[in-house]
Image (tube, rainbow, N blue to C red):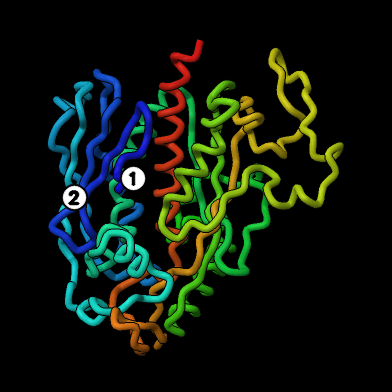
Amino acid sequence: MSNTFGRLFKLTTFGESHGVSVGGIIDGFPAGFLVDLNNIQSKVNLRRPGKSNLTSSRDELDIVEFQSGIFEKKTLGSPISFLIKNKDFKKKDYKGVKGLFRPSHADFTYEKKYGIRDPYGGGRSSARETVCRVVAGALASQFLDQKGISVFSYVSSVGDIKLTKSYKDLDFSKIYKNEIFCPDDICALEMKKKIQEIKGAGDTIGGCVSTVIKGVPIGLGEPIYNKLNAALSFALMSINAAKGVEFGSGFSSINMLGSAHNDLFVKKGNKIGTSTNHSGGIQGGISNGEDIFFNVAFKPVSSVMVNQKTVDKDQEEVTFFNRGRHDPCVVSRAVPVVESMVSMVLMDMYLLNLSSK
């Protein structure tokens, strides 16, 4: 089982949804870096459940406890280990699922592959693990800040409610001003109503998280197997419920002609840039100095509060009703996770690029 992400900047995570704790080991972070521990905790708090009726009611404090690798707020160059204790888990909610397979969950595939599974909250397959990614991503983000690289993720759609403005017309400082994490208050209100409506019916709904990366230098990524867009896609598709990624013009490009889609090179001050950005800031797998932007599609959460048919281990048909605590829409809590995965990829690519010449 693969539990480690990254090549030079690495994160290894451990723990299950309803276990004693989750945590991770970060390796490859340079020594002597002054860490803002409060900033890391604040990023983790953005993902934390139980803050509103739009998310799971599981009320975890998610206090990050660093165990090693940091001395007097500076990195030592050694592995940075951390622990987050699970406090508010209810195993009784899952007693009825031990012998059956929940629709569209990892129950069936996990058990068939490994011959065993932890049924409580999805065990290792649970999105609970993503809190560890936010810790590592927040640390990577501080490194990127010093290099002038900024990552902005936000909710751009919930169901058929879509933010139609170009990202260039958005004020990213407003992203975390509402509970949807959408930088447009009017659109956020409509999204909130939609989620509440779906939740009231016991169902769930999907949506989209968009990301803009500014300040990326020319040259991150490689032309063949370690393309920047491929590395980002790999990272983003590892997030629970992610179903698709598109960069720049994405799938809409199939309706364009090449002459219209080409990003023409122009002089921008004393630099070369492009007049348009259909490429989304990446060409030939390598960053070109323009803004990188992409969308990530998230499916409706599989845990719904309605009766559903399934089968048990004996292949007998049964009717199943989910009794756990789950998000009616995952996109808001996915925003800090997306930012974190992007930050980890960019830091890894930055370190790899130092040895490319």
How many neighbours does mark 2 have within 10 angstroms: few (below 14), some (14-19), or many (20 or more)?
Answer: many
Mark 2 or mark 1: name the one nearer the start of the chain: 2
Tell me the quarter of the picture where residue 187 sits: bottom right
Q: How many marks?
A: 2
Position above or below: 194 against 285: below
Q: Residue 253 in the image: state x and y as whole percent.
A: 75, 47
Kind of residue sitting beneath label 2 = Ile
Residue 352 can be seen in this image: yes
Q: Determine the residue positioned at 33% across, 51% down.
A: 130
Residue under circle 1? 134
Left or right? Give the position of 312 relative to 148.
left
Q: Toward the viewer: 184 or 20?
A: 20
Q: Determine the residue positioned at 48% across, 50% down.
A: 237
Secondary element at tag 2: strand
Position above or below: 164 against 103: above
Q: Residue 10 in the image: state x and y as whole percent.
A: 32, 33
Tell me the quarter of the picture where residue 100 sits: bottom left
Residue under circle 2? 84
Question: Of the numbered discs in the image, which one, if any, rests on residue 51?
Answer: none
Q: Residue 136 in the image: state x and y as whole percent.
A: 31, 38
Secondary element at tag 1: helix
Q: Toward the viewer: 129 or 210?
A: 129
